[in-house]
Image (cartoon, rainbow, N blue to C red):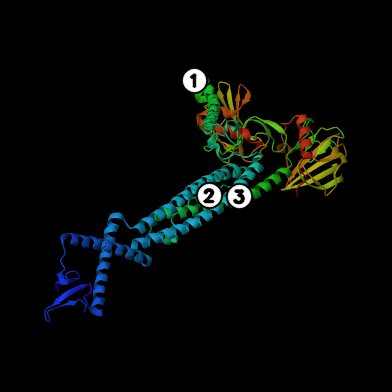
Amino acid sequence: MARTRYRFNPESLSFDRVTLGFGAIIMRSLAYIVGSAMIAVVYWVIFAAFFDSPKEKALKRELSQLTVQYEILSREMGDMEEVLHHLQRTDDNLYRAIFNAEPLPVSYREGGVGGLNRYKDLEGFNNSELVIETAKRLDKIRKRIYTQSKSFDELIALTKEKEAMVRCIPAIMPISNRDLTRTASGYGPRIHPYYKIIKFHTGMDFTAPSGTEVYATGDGVVSEIITSNRGYGNYIVVDHGFGYTSLYAHLDRFNARKGQKVQRGEVIGFVGNTGMSLAPHLHYEVKLNGRTVDPVNYYFNDLTPEEYERMIELASKTGQSFD
Amino acid sequence: MAFKSGKYFFDDVDLQYKRVRLPFSRRLLRFAVWFAASVIMFFIYRYAFTKTFGSPEEARLMSSIETVMLELNMIDREMDDMIERLNEFRLSDDHRYRPVLEMDTLPSNFRQPATGGIERYGELTGFINSGTLLELVNKRDHIATQLNLQNESFRAISDKTTEWRRQMEYLPIISPVNVSFRLGDGIKFREKHPVHGNPQWHHGQDFRTPVGTPVYATGAGTVIEAGWNSGGFGNYVVIDHGYGFRTTYGHLSAVKTVKGALVKRGDRIGLSGNTGISSGPHLHYQIDLFGKIQNPLHYFNDDLTEEEYIEMIRILSAGAQYRQ
């Protein structure tokens, strides 16, 4: 019904036909578009208040589920953290009770530096942070170099000798101890578990259940197999030549005969609790020209510098030997 | 009539300009049509906008989800940290405490993370981040289980440690007199008893001690005999150490304890002498385990010096009080 429209013109007092120019058409359509867009926005607001798109619905559901789970989890994390703390205390107490020593802090990966603020005098300068950081790093490096140089000295001494000597020197740990947690007591003065007096501990103790394999730590000949109820209990002595002998005590049983040639890593016996022993453990001793030496200095074959450092720390810290 | 502004149309019938007047129903219809058109336009606009820019609501939701996921990610890292710490405990447990206490290590399948569990968390499936979320709750469950397990395990170890330490105090594991004294007869079959002259088993270990040498309890326990023994031990003391162990100290010149007394290792219980059936001053020391004679030499070492023995007795007798 495209009827012609008119508009009354009060000036000429006549009816003018309503015609639209091109500009007016543009203006009109522009106005239309803007207007409709505005209306669309209004609609959108109203629409969004009452309805969600399926995707929004899904996202909302996900968000609320995530939030709920987050709240649950963070609450539980708090609880679990508490239990962990409790476990840490128990662990420390057990360590004190069984090893008669203060437990090492867990952060051994840091190289054992820290605790006290040794860098206080470096604080308060413009670049304090950098200086302290560098000083700390230097300390760590120094410590590492020190421990490393110890093993280097041995290595240099070794390379000067024949290859045979390298094979013969007792240079591994006598039991599998990858994470070093079997290290119980080191060489040096320790509180005796029964006598409660300080006695010189001539070897190293490793905690391990009865029946754990014991390895020859270097090539050599089994020079002694002793079965006894006293002292070292059942023990094996391996003569490595070059003045070195190693002794494995409190064994449950043997896996070698006297005079037998053994190679590094060969199973020569099994951990036990024979003789004067507090608990199943291996007492391992190294002698050089008849005098006991600290076995820790000879583990360079299977330890990284970090592990070596950790080992020294562990071995030096325990307060009580096991025999 | 006055003409107002507005729209007019020319009526062909009565040849007049007439104002355009619409009845209410027509207006309503017009409005309805207009409304329908605008709604359609709205959807078109919305579609076009969402296509090009994405929905603002969705974007808002997505960014909220991202924030929560970030928090959850932090929790995940904390959880990994917890698992590592738990692992330290496990190593201590397996390698340090249980071997020393002669306890079996926990079977490793106890320590395995529980697999599956997706059925239990059905409400968490079907989301964009379902994978992460499920992983997280499973990890949480794993940690919770491990925490419980470790707690139980440590409790068992703790109890055992208390028992172990008590046992350490009770077992007869030192020499009853200073190690500087020479040993006499040990456990052996004697062809000729030094006093009776007949063949007889000797059930203990003799120490050649002069009369008046202090004799010490070799482990904590209860004195069950203290006084005269008509069987030949003369003045004697018997201590019950529990765990099946009893020690007898014979031929004493003086008894320094009383029946029923609680003693600890290193307590002086008497002085050695030459009472009872004895051919000379000495201490007779005897250990039995559930009534079976033990060789006392297997229960102490000769790795102490005279001074160390004195120091040991000093420390032991100054040590903690007797514990029941």
Q: Where is residue A254 in the image (x, y as percent from the top left)?
A: 57, 35
Q: Position of residue A212 (x, y in %)?
A: 55, 40
Residue B245 visible somewhere in the drawing? yes
Q: Position of residue A128 (x, y in %)?
A: 54, 32
Residue A260 visible somewhere in the drawing? no
Q: In which quarter of the image is residue B192?
A: top right
Mark 2: few, some, or many residues within 10 Å (few <14, many ≥20)?
A: few
Q: In this view, does B233 lie to the left or right of A125?
A: right
Residue on which disc 3 sits: A86
Residue on which disc 1 sits: A159
Label 3 and label 1: CA atoms lie apart by 50 Å
Helix, strand or loop under label 1 = helix
Q: Where is residue A124 in the image (x, y as percent from the top left)?
A: 57, 33
Q: In this view, does A10 lie to the left or right of A303?
A: left
Q: Is residue B268 left or right of residue A40?
A: right
Label 2 and label 1: CA atoms lie apart by 45 Å
Q: Do callouts 2 and 1 point to residues on the same chain?
A: no
Q: Label 1 amino acid?
A: Thr
Residue on which disc 2 sits: B107
In the rendered image, the quadrant that contains the N terminus of chain A is bottom left
